[in-house]
Structures are given as C-alpha cells and as structure tokens.
Amino acid sequence: MYAVAVKPERTEAIILQTFAGRERDKMVVFITPDHGKRKGWAYGARSMRSRFGAALEPLAKVRIGYIEREGDEVVRIESIDLIRSLFPAQQDLVRSVSATFIAEMIDTFAQANDPAELLYRLLDRTTAALLEGASPLAVVTYAEIWILRLAGIFPSAKNCIECHEPLERPLRFDGRLQGFVCAQCAGRDASVVPNQVSDALDAIAKLAVTDFAARAIKIDTLFEVRSLAGTIRRNFLGYELKSFEVLAQVMI
Ligand SMILES: [Zn+2]
C-alpha cells in the first residue's frame, strides 16, 4: 500500500459558481491567484446549520481551506471565511448581472490548475468597482477587453495583422482575419474603427478599472468597444455566453 499524497491548501479565492450535489453537498467552482480555477466539494453546505454559512454565494471573495488528494481533480473544502460579499450589488439588477457576466467570462477563459493571478485580480478589482458604485457599463467593457488580452486573443493594435507595418489612425478591423489591418491591406471585410473607440481601447490598456470608469466616455463609444470585444470573443469561442443576453436586456 502506498499512501496517497494529501496536500492542505489555504488561499484567497473568489467563488464563480455553485451546484447542488447529492444529499446536502455543494459543488463549488472557485478561482485562486496561484492555483487557477478549482472545483471542490463542500460537504453539508446545504444543511440549515452549515459551517460554510453565506460565504458560498457566487462572487463572494473568501479565504478558503481545502484538501487536495493527488490525482483527484475535485478538492475537499474544509473551511471558508468571507472577505467580501457581493450582497450589496445584488440589490441592483444591472450591477448584479454585470458581475455574473464577468464571472462567466472568467470561468470560460480560466484554465484549471493554471496560475491565473492576472485573471483573478481582474475579477477582484472589477467586482470591487461594481460594489463601489462605478458605472456597470464601463466596468463590463473594461473586463471584456482585458479578458481577451489576458487570453492572448485580442489582436495587436500596433501592427497590421497582414503586412506587420505599423498601424495609423483610424484603425481598421478585418472581420475575416480577426485583426487590425493597415489602409493598404484593408479589403472589403475591413471596417473603420472610430478614433474615440481606439482611444477607449488605449485607456483600458493603461488605466486601472476605477480610473477608466471615472472617465466620462460616451455610452455609444463603450457599446462600440463591447461590440468589437463580442465579435472577437464569439469568433474564438464559437458561441455566445449564457449571461450575455440577460445583460443586454437590463443594460440599456
Ligand atoms: Zn498591412
């Protein structure tokens, strides 16, 4: 008999989703800075007097203790202490759905067991910004672009995807190539990106989310940035995220 290696971990995490399991158990999907996205069982979490309490709600920021057995994909959750609840934002439909949409994007793009510190920080800071009253549209726009950047899918806005020459304003986006092209390479699939959209993309790349949200960027411009992000995301995934439509209905 060989003993199975058992490793206890204790780390900061944000809950992405929970599912009801057998009996009174809950399956919890969470993201951590150092161990990426993980899945764990919280045994007895659905009983009335669960020791996990309200800390298991989606988007709660927690300190989580779990036990990992070598070879098991699913860990066993031992303890959860709440650091920050999403609760105040849940009283505001647009904020609540915005947070859910950002969490679904992170859940989709985060790899299991892959360190995901930047994705984790993005989720942490955008959720905090929503709780602190930043414009939900600005926060969602920021998150959509950054998730594509961190996933390595957002194309370079510096060089033409076709001939690699430096790009000039206005930028042109080619839907077939899924990248920015120069005036010479622009074919019939390329559309001109308004300069205020390019400025917003620059601001997203340079600023923290709260500073970006504090800039009074026009709603139309933010929707154009979202439209570009949506095109690139759908092209990569081959489908649209579940909460996208819900968000579209509440964010007018
Ligand atoms: Zn070119």
Image (cartoon, grey):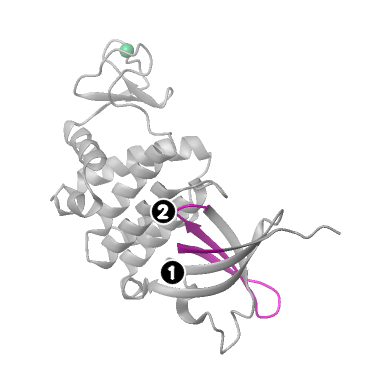
Q: What secondary structure is the stretch in magenta mostly built from?
A: strand
Q: Name the residue under label 1.
A: 62
Query: In the picture shown, does residue 18 fall above or below 163?
Result: below
In screen coordinates, is 2 left or right of 103? right
Q: Is residue 18 magenta?
A: yes
Q: Is residue 231 magenta?
A: no
Ligand 1, image quadrant it occupies: top left
Identified by mark 1, the residue type is: Val
The magenta segment is 9-35
In front: 80, or 29? 80
On whether ligand 1 comes within 8 Å of the CB at mark 2, the answer is no
Image: 41 above or below 122: below
* Residue 245 appears in the rendering: no
Q: Which amino acid does label 2 sit on?
A: Tyr
Name the residue: 66% across, 72% down.
21
Residue 25 in view in this figure:
yes
Q: Residue furthest right?
A: 1
* Numbered mark located on residue 120 in the image: 2
Give whichever of discs 1 and 2 has the lower sequence position.
Answer: 1
Please give the label number shown on residue 20: none
Q: In which quadrant of the rendered view does residue 133 lie? A: bottom left
In this rendering, position of residue 150 left or right of residue 221? right
Query: What residue do we see at 20% from left, 49% from top?
Result: 212
Q: Is mark 1 within 8 Å of ligand 1?
A: no
* Image quarter of residue 177: top left
Residue 242 at what x, y percent from top left? 49, 55
Image quadrant occupied by the N terminus: bottom right
Q: In this view, does 247 lie above or below 111?
A: below
Give the distance between the C-alpha atoms of the residues marked 1 and 2, in whole angstroms: 12 Å
- Residue at the extreme front of the image, as rendered: 2
